[in-house]
């Protein structure tokens, strides 16, 4: 499993990453301090079942310290995402390519509202930062789906899953999504009406 740490530029992603992994990385008060992604391992602490069994365990995959299991979670700190990143703005496409490796994301928001969506010092509504990430990820996936129409159109859903395989989208979620559009799973159609119907709705996986 790999979790991507995402957010607009200058929002505190690397600060969170460094606190969670103890990896020293560049942190600064301006946008695009991080360009190449930083990789490290954070630990989720969970009470280990050995506390109830009243013995000490010796797990191979993680440390158990005083009955607390240290579960390793690889983290990836990537470049900031700006409006229209899916069209290449900012470090758009590089960011999105780095994100392909991640199984899930943590969105880091600058709750002070003192920097805009480009990470510059201007007043801003922090809730817009979550919308920004949702919009850019959705538009990016949508552009891949529309660009590869010839590979899955009029074919079973498996072909569409193949097109999206690099994005680690769950197969069952994909089948359910196709169902929710009222599409035949054996004959995927991506006409303009369907493309329009998905517009504006986050594609939950
Ligand atoms: N007050 C305050 N400042 C913070 C906090 N987290 C980060 N900062 C500051 O915010 C600035 C940006 O932090 P970074 O961690 O470099 O932000 P980033 O999102 O990785 O930035 P980019 O890599 O440029 O996209 C730095 O000056 C940090 O010291 C916080 O929780 N509170
Ligand atoms: Mg950074």
Image (cartoon, rainbow, N blue to C red):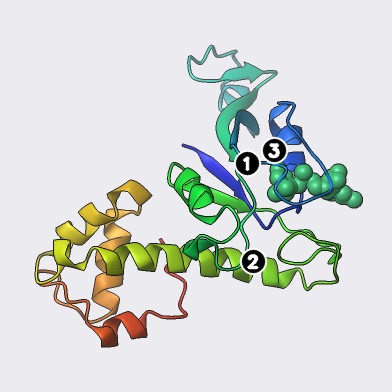
Question: Can I make out residue 168 in this image?
Answer: no
Q: Is residue 42 above or below residue 159?
A: above
| Label 1 residue near ligand 1, CB within 8 Å | yes
Of helix, strand and loop, which one carries label 1? Answer: loop
In the rendered image, the vertical position of residue 61 relative to residue 145, given as above or below: above
The single residue placed furthest to the bottom in the displayed view is 193
Instruction: Confirm whether residue 190 shows in the render.
Output: yes
Give the residue pinned by disc 1: 35
Residue 62, quarter of picture? top right
Front residue (pair 185, 162)? 162
Instruction: Give the image location of residue 104, x and y in percent.
Output: 50, 49
* Image depth: mark 1 or mark 2 in front: 1
Mark 3 surroundings within 10 Å by alpha-carbon count, few (fewer than 14), some (14 through 19), many (20 or more): many
Which residue matches tag 2?
130
Indicate which label's residue lies in the foreground, 3 or 1: 1
Question: Residue 17 shows which numbered tag?
Answer: 3
Q: Position of residue 35 (x, y in %)?
A: 63, 41
Mark 3 or mark 1, which has the lower sequence index? 3
Q: Residue at x 28, y 58 (%)?
A: 172
Please state if 26 lies on the left or on the right of 73 as rendered.
right
Q: Position of residue 23 (x, y in %)?
A: 71, 26
Mark 2 is surrounded, within 10 Å at the Cα level, by few (under 14), some (14 to 19) or many (20 or more) other residues, namely some
**Within-10-Å neighbours for mark 1: few <14, some 14–19, many 20+:** some
Q: How many marks?
A: 3
């Amino acid at each position: 499993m790999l979790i991507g740490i995402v957010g607009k530029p200058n929002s505190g992603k690397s600060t969170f990453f460094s606190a969670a992994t103890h990896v020293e990385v560049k942190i600064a008060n301006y946008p695009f301090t991080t360009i190449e992604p930083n990789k490290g391992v954070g630990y989720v602490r969970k009470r280990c079942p050995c506390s109830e069994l009243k013995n000490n365990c010796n797990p191979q995959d993680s440390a158990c310290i005083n009955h607390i299991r240290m579960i390793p979670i690889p983290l990836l700190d990537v470049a900031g995402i700006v409006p229209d990143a899916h069209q290449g703005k900012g470090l758009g496409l590089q960011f999105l390519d780095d994100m392909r490796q991640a199984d899930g994301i943590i969105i880091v928001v600058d709750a002070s509202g003192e920097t805009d969506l480009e990470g510059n010092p201007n007043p801003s509504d922090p809730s817009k930062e979550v919308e920004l990430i949702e919009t850019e990820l959705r538009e990016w996936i949508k552009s891949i789906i529309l660009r590869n129409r010839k590979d899955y159109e009029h074919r079973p859903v498996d072909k569409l899953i193949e097109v999206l395989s690099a994005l680690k989208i769950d197969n069952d979620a994909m089948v359910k999504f196709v169902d929710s559009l009222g599409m035949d799973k054996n004959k995927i159609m991506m006409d303009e009406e369907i493309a329009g119907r998905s517009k504006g709705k986050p594609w939950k996986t």
